Image: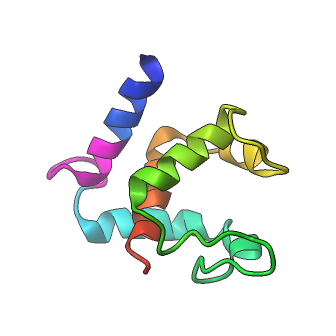
């Protein structure tokens, strides 16, 4: 229940008018700042390659949020993504997801 509530708050922070990350430009800016950490493995545009999955062009922000939460909670198998995902807050996960969801 608490996880669901935190996810809802993070998503609202990104998408609701007046929220701390409201507006597409602000969400993209917040996500862009965080996405630099993803580029080493997933590529500069998040396109993946060489065995790494693409982050851009997926089925929307909700899918990326679910994946990162799964890695963070150890409910999805991963090599390093569990450790990486545990370093992000709910708002940061939502911002990253919003950023990559806009990059088709």
Q: Quadrant of the N terminus?
A: top left
Q: Which residue is pictured at 44% across the width and 18% down the height?
A: 2
Query: Is 85 drawn above or below residue 100 in the view shown?
Result: above
Q: Which residue is pictured at 35% across the width and 62% down the height?
A: 27
Residue 43 falls left or right of residue 5: right
* Residue farthest toward the top in the current orientation of the protein: 1
Q: Residue 84 location, x and y as percent? A: 73, 49
Q: Quadrant of the C terminus?
A: bottom left
Residue 75 falls left or right of residue 67: right
Residue 72 falls left or right of residue 58: right
Q: Residue 21 location, x and y as percent? A: 31, 54
38 or 77, which lies in front? 77
30 or 1, which lies in front? 1
Q: Is residue 13 visible?
A: yes
103 or 39, which lies in front? 103
* Residue farthest toward the left in the current orientation of the protein: 17
Q: Is residue 92 visible?
A: no
Q: Residue 28 location, x and y as percent? A: 38, 69
Q: Residue 94 location, x and y as percent? A: 43, 50
* Residue farthest toward the right in the current orientation of the protein: 79
Query: Is 66 drawn above or below residue 32 in the view shown?
Result: above
Q: Please give the range of residues in magenta.
A: 11-21
In this rendering, the count of numbered labels is: 0
36 or 6, which lies in front? 6
- Choose top left, top right, bottom left or bottom right for residue 54: bottom right
Residue 4 falls left or right of residue 89: left
Q: Which residue is pictured at 29% across the width and 71% down the height?
A: 25
**Would residue 68 be counted in the magenta stretch?**
no
- Choose top left, top right, bottom left or bottom right for residue 24: bottom left
Q: Which residue is pictured at 47% across the width and 74% down the height?
A: 57
Query: How did the renderer colour the structure?
Result: rainbow
């Amino acid at each position: 229940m608490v996880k669901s509530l935190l996810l809802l708050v993070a998503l609202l922070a990104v998408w609701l008018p007046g929220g701390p990350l409201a507006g597409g430009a602000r969400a993209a800016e917040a996500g862009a700042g965080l996405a630099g950490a993803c580029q080493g493995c997933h590529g500069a545009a998040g396109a993946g390659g060489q065995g790494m999955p693409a982050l851009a062009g997926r089925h929307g922000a909700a899918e990326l949020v679910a994946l990162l939460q799964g890695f963070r909670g150890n409910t999805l198998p991963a090599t390093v993504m569990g450790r990486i995902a545990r370093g992000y807050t709910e708002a940061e996960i939502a911002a990253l997801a919003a950023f990559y969801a806009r990059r088709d």
